[in-house]
Image (spheres, rainbow, N blue to C red):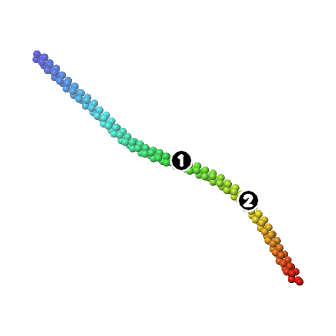
Amino acid sequence: MAYMKRNVNFGFFFLLIATLMSLAGLSIYYQTTFKDLYMDYKLKLDDLRNISSTLSTEKTKLEQTSQELNIKEEREKELSTQYTDLKTEKEKLEDQKATLQKQLAEKTSELVQKRAELATAQAELSISKTELNAAMATISGLRADISRLDDEIASLCACP
């Protein structure tokens, strides 16, 4: 029995050594695995920080672009409004121009007509002045005749 007891103790000792070696092997395996996982975690964390930094930078750029786009949209609306106003003003001015050109044409034809009337009136005036001068000359001649005849009448009446 001592032999069996020794075999059993030896078996338990061998089992204990195997268990300890298994435990040591598992500890080394899990430690290596944990170390690899921790290194992967650190790499992924660094990548995540870099991505977060890049994302933050891109977010800032996107906000700036958005603000610039809003400013451009406001300018575009303002320019569109100004364009519409200027287009309306241009159409009004073109209408006024057409009206004024029509009035100018009417006034020009009226001026031509008035000039023709003026020329006719000046010709009539010239004729009238000529006739007046002729009549004045006739009147002067007749007055001279009257004066002469008065003198003759007076000289005839003075003869007894």
Ranked by sequence position, the earlier of labels 1 and 2 is 1
Q: Which residue is drawn at 79% across and 71% down?
A: 136
Which residue is most to the right?
160
Which of the 4 image quadrants contains residue 67?
Answer: top left
* Mark identifier at residue 84: 1
Compared to 8, does 68 lie above or below? Answer: below
Which of the 4 image quadrants contains residue 38?
Answer: top left
* Mark identifier at residue 62: none
Q: Which amino acid does label 2 sit on?
A: Ala
Which residue is most to the top?
1
Q: Residue at x 65, y 52 (%)?
A: 102
Which residue is most to the left?
2
- Element type at marker 1? helix
Inspect this view and state whether residue 61 appears: no
Image check: 116 left or right of 33?
Answer: right
Instruction: Find residue 1 and report its horizontal and vertical position in percent.
Output: 11, 16
Residue 82 or residue 95, whichever sits in front: 95
Image check: 59 left or right of 14?
Answer: right
Image check: 104 left or right of 5?
Answer: right
- Element type at marker 2? helix
Q: Which residue is drawn at 83% across and 77% down?
A: 147
Which of the 4 image quadrants contains residue 132?
Answer: bottom right
Image check: 116 left or right of 28?
Answer: right
Which residue is most to the front?
160
Instruction: Find residue 59 and report its horizontal and vertical position in percent.
Output: 39, 42
Residue 138 or residue 57, whichever sits in front: 138
Q: What residue type is labelled 1?
A: Thr
* Mark identifier at residue 116: 2
Q: Which residue is drawn at 22% across and 25% down?
A: 22
